[in-house]
Amino acid sequence: MSATPPWTQLQEETHAPLRGFLRSIKKQKDLKLEAILVYGSAARGEFLEGYSNINVLVVLEQITQPVLQRWSGIHKQWAREKIIAPLFLTHTDLQQSSDVFPLEYLDIKECHVLLEGRDPFPELHVNQAHLFVQCRQEIHANLLRVRQCYVEGWGRVEAIQTVLPLSLTALLPCLRGLYRLLNRPSNIKSPEIMDELKATLDVDPSVFFEVWRLKRGLSTPGKHELPKLLDRYLTGLGQLVDRIESMKHEARF
């Protein structure tokens, strides 16, 4: 009896594109593939067809221009199926950058599905010493990007519809990182992450839920409501930044 394909651990909507994606990879010779895994919303059981992307990480023995050129052909074929350009790493990259990207690597280590090869994450040590610094920097940068992107979008409601879901997508891993540092549950789905905001960081989660519903296509605010939503979101992000700064001054980490 054949083993159950690994992609069956993921939501059914991702099975067909991942099967085809893997077939395309296996047709290529001498890629020296060491591992390929899925992370992000698909691995967390939050993939929503028509809205979510499939995030893939590829570990290769060697990464050269010709190798990337061949992968570009695979990407061109499968990008329309929401499989975004993979994150390409070698084992050396993983070891050398684990303290540079603790937030991303801990998130992947905590929740991913191995599709091919040998999983490098169980044995990967990620030092959390720099985790608070990265979370703080990312949350500050998030607030600045929202302001900038709104202005770049000429203050149109279309800019709000684009920037708010992107901002929340970037914010959620930062919240997971902070929860890890505070010994709170972190390997939980997005609604639970937001629900924990009040108890863990003393920040009202209501506006983040509003944006999450917008992101998931569960809410369609009108053109008069979107500017008000942006204003509330900027206030919520500002409160979160203030809380992070308080934690820094308290020397919590």
Image: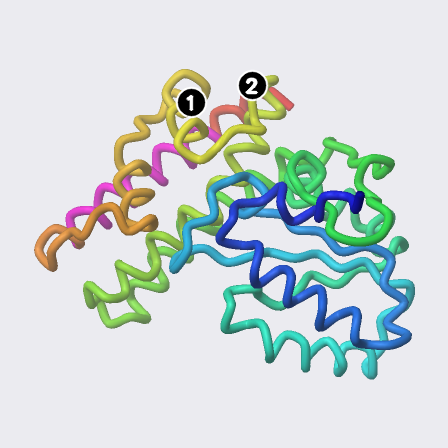
Q: Is residue 228 found left or right of 60 in the rendered image?
A: left
**Helix, strand or loop at disc 2?**
loop
Q: Position of residue 26 (x, y in %)?
A: 79, 69
Q: Is residue 226 magenta?
A: no
Magenta segment, prevailing SS (helix, strand or loop): helix
Q: Position of residue 30 (x, y in %)?
A: 90, 74
Q: Is residue 230 magenta?
A: yes
Query: Disc 1 or 2, which lies upstream in sequence?
Result: 2
Badge 1 amino acid? Glu
Q: Is residue 201 above or below residue 21?
A: above
Q: Residue at x 70, y 56 (%)?
A: 57
Q: Is residue 94 above or below residue 82?
A: above
Badge 2 amino acid? Arg
Q: Is residue 24 above or below residue 233?
A: below
> How far apart, in angstroms, are the residues tagged by discs 1 and 2?
9 Å
The color scheme shown is rainbow
Say whether marks 1 and 2 touch (CB < 8 Å).
yes
Compare residues 101 and 58 and report the one nearer the observer: 58
Q: Position of residue 219 (x, y in %)?
A: 21, 47
Residue at mark 1: 196
Label 1: how many Cα within 10 Å (few below 14, some 14–19, many 20+): many
The magenta region covers 227-244
Residue at mark 2: 184
Label 2: how many Cα within 10 Å (few below 14, some 14–19, many 20+): few
Q: Is residue 19 found left or right of 29 in the rendered image?
A: left
Quadrant of image for the N terminus: top right
Compare residues 108 and 179 and report the one nearer the observer: 108
**Helix, strand or loop at disc 1?**
loop
Q: Residue at x 58, y 29 (%)?
A: 187
Quadrant for residue 183, please give it: top right
Q: Is residue 72 found left or right of 192 in the rendered image?
A: right
